[in-house]
Image: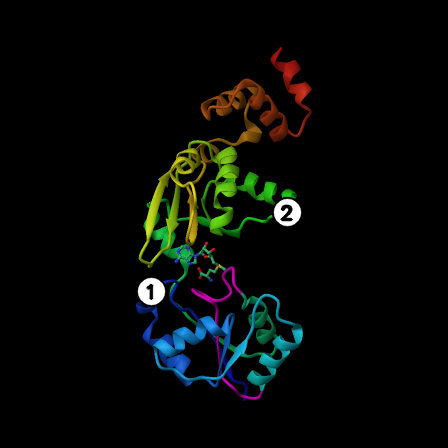
Amino acid sequence: MSGKLYLVATPIGNLEDITLRALRILKEVDYIVAEDTRQTLKLLNHFEIVKPMISYHRHSTEEREEQIIDKLKQGKNIALVSDAGTPAISDPGEQIVKNALKENIEIIPIPGPCALIAALIASGIDTKEFTFLGFLPLNKKSRKEKLIEIEHSTKTTILYEAPHKLITTLNDLKQVTNKRKIVLAKEITKIHETYFSGTAEELLEVIKEPKGEFVIIIDKNILDEEQNLENMSLEEHYKFYEKLGYEKKEIIKQIAKDKKVKKDEIYKKFL
Ligand code: SAM
């Protein structure tokens, strides 16, 4: 009989956040598959757990994935952990889960800390509906597409970001979110845990040299929720962007983009 694959969430800063079940599973399994074995060793040492570890990270080979699946097929129970938080959320794990399911291996999540959920519930921003986009892509075209998605999103958007890229990302968000509220959740569960709230522009005035880990929570676009750009008359469309504080030139450019026509066409209509 095959073994079980446990996806074990681990603390994102405060070791007290490990669950009793996570500790039991880590003690009981045959192997721990870890994103960073040195990091996981610190956790295991703290809780006096001694267990053989297998390294598995984003650059691991297919061969390593096969080794893990083979061990499960041989009846070994495995716990998969990432550096911190919930495995397979902007972390390795997803592929192993897919491969294991193909082999009818039982997958058991052991829920616990997850930065996006902790940040969202503390943000004061709508939790009913949200979109998690992970890290924004670095590729220019894909990044622009995601930013447009955020611009028109009628749901809360959640992003992860590395500290050295935070200012660039806030500058990009400034272009598409205007006066919408953004919350930056910094170092959740750690000593320097702080929540910053404001528009992208306001946040850029406060955060000059970001250090630590950040989750970005962006409020929905209420105007988009209320109005459907495609069905608007030209005048309504103009007023919509005027309300957002856009200049005439920008408004015309934006309308042309929304209506997928050339800028000149819109110019002529306004003349
Ligand atoms: N799997 C993890 C989870 O469950 O949240 C996420 C891993 S992802 C590689 C790392 C990103 O998560 C960081 O760049 C940051 O955006 C966010 N993050 C992780 N821990 C955090 C913390 N303590 N405070 C704020 N953000 C955190």
- Could you tell me residue 168's position as x and y percent? 52, 41
Three-letter code, disc 2: Asn
Identity of the residue drawn at 61% across and 73% down: 99
Magenta highlight range: 74-91
According to the picture, the residue beneath numbered tag 2 turns out to be: 139
For ligand 1, the image quadrant comes to bottom left
- Give the structural element (helix, strand or loop) at label 1: loop
- Could you tell me residue 163's position as x and y percent? 47, 50
Three-letter code, disc 1: Asn
According to the picture, the residue beneath numbered tag 1 turns out to be: 14
Q: CA distance from mark 1 to mark 2?
A: 34 Å
Please name whichever residue, 167 or 151, is drawn nearer the observer in this view of the structure: 167
Identity of the residue drawn at 37% across and 63% down: 13
**Which secondary structure is most common in the magenta stretch?**
loop
Viewport quadrant of the C terminus:
top right
Residue 152 shows up from this direction: no
